[in-house]
Amino acid sequence: MTIFEAVVLGIVQGLTEFLPVSSSGHLVLMQHFLGLKEPQVFFDVMLHVGTLGAVIIVYYQSIWSLLRTGIAALGDTNLYRHPFRTIENSPHLKLIWFILLGCIPTGLIAILFKEQLESIFDKPMIVALMLVVTGLILQLPRLKRRHANTDSALKGWHTLLIGSIQGGAIIPGISRSGSTISLSLLLGLSPQEAAQYSFLLSIPAILGAVVLKLKDVAKIAIAPSVIVAGALASFVVGYIALRILLAMLNRGRFSMFSYYCFAVGGIVLIKLML
């Protein structure tokens, strides 16, 4: 892989990680059409690290507040005497708990089905089909708007559902942000709360993927400079894309990305079948 190819893939990652069109799915298809025959799973993970930096920059105030609250709570005896009451009375502790709770199904899916899910990374036909599925998922918020007009607060059982769909989004072609935000909106969360929880929940998921892939570093036949170039491109473009997504989400235009997924998935399926 050349630096140019890495930058192209980094740009694709940055755009598609936050725009709800499946970054992993686009990377698989790009690698296929660039002629990279072996799936570059570790490289894909490092590109996700680049976009993780964008999340940290955009949500640094929330992340810093959660870290301060979490560290302070460790020295609070009330947390150990009355954990549920203490968490319920602190919005920050409650959000930390919800993030941890949401990570459980994601982690279980990643560990139990890791090999099966990673095998899809060299199957562009399945990826194209999953892009069509993502398009259907992006239509879910419209169901909520038809039947309810009020928002509801994030609940514990919400986080288990959202964490589960995030785990399923390991499949390339299924958008992580698209599926988690769509489900959150369907459950009644506001656009701001849906986006914040989705992207904060992605932080431990991405870090976990990196840890799982550290053992493969010695096997990677890609120069460090190529990996850095790709990650840097994904960070810069990802920051811009995240800002665009948040603006469109607030304007109620989130579901419009479904038509893009239908189009790309359909075109790729036709091309692969010809």
Image (tube, rainbow, N blue to C red):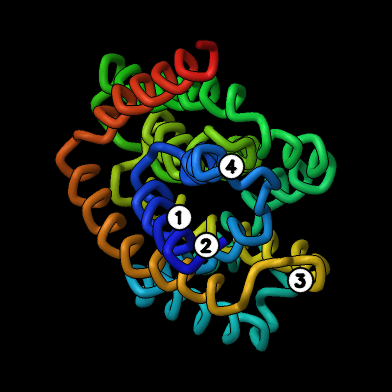
**Left or right of residue 15, residue 39 in this image:** right
Residue at 80 percent of width and 35 percent of height: 116
Residue with the mark numbered 1: 9
Amino acid, disc 1: Leu
Judge by depth and name the residue closer to the eye, 86 or 117.
Answer: 117
Q: CA distance from mark 2 to mark 3?
A: 14 Å
Q: CA distance from mark 4 to mark 1?
A: 22 Å
Q: CA distance from mark 2 to mark 4?
A: 18 Å
Residue with the mark numbered 4: 166
Rate crowding at label 3 as few (under 14), some (14 to 19) or many (20 or more) other CA atoms within 10 Å.
Answer: few
Give x and y (percent) for residue 53: 44, 72
Q: Quadrant of the N terminus?
A: bottom right
**Disc number placed over residue 47 in the picture, else none:** 2
Question: Nearer the N terminus, badge 1 or badge 3?
Answer: 1
Residue with the mark numbered 3: 217
Amino acid, disc 3: Val
For the residue labelled by badge 3, is the local secondary structure a helix, a strand or a loop? helix
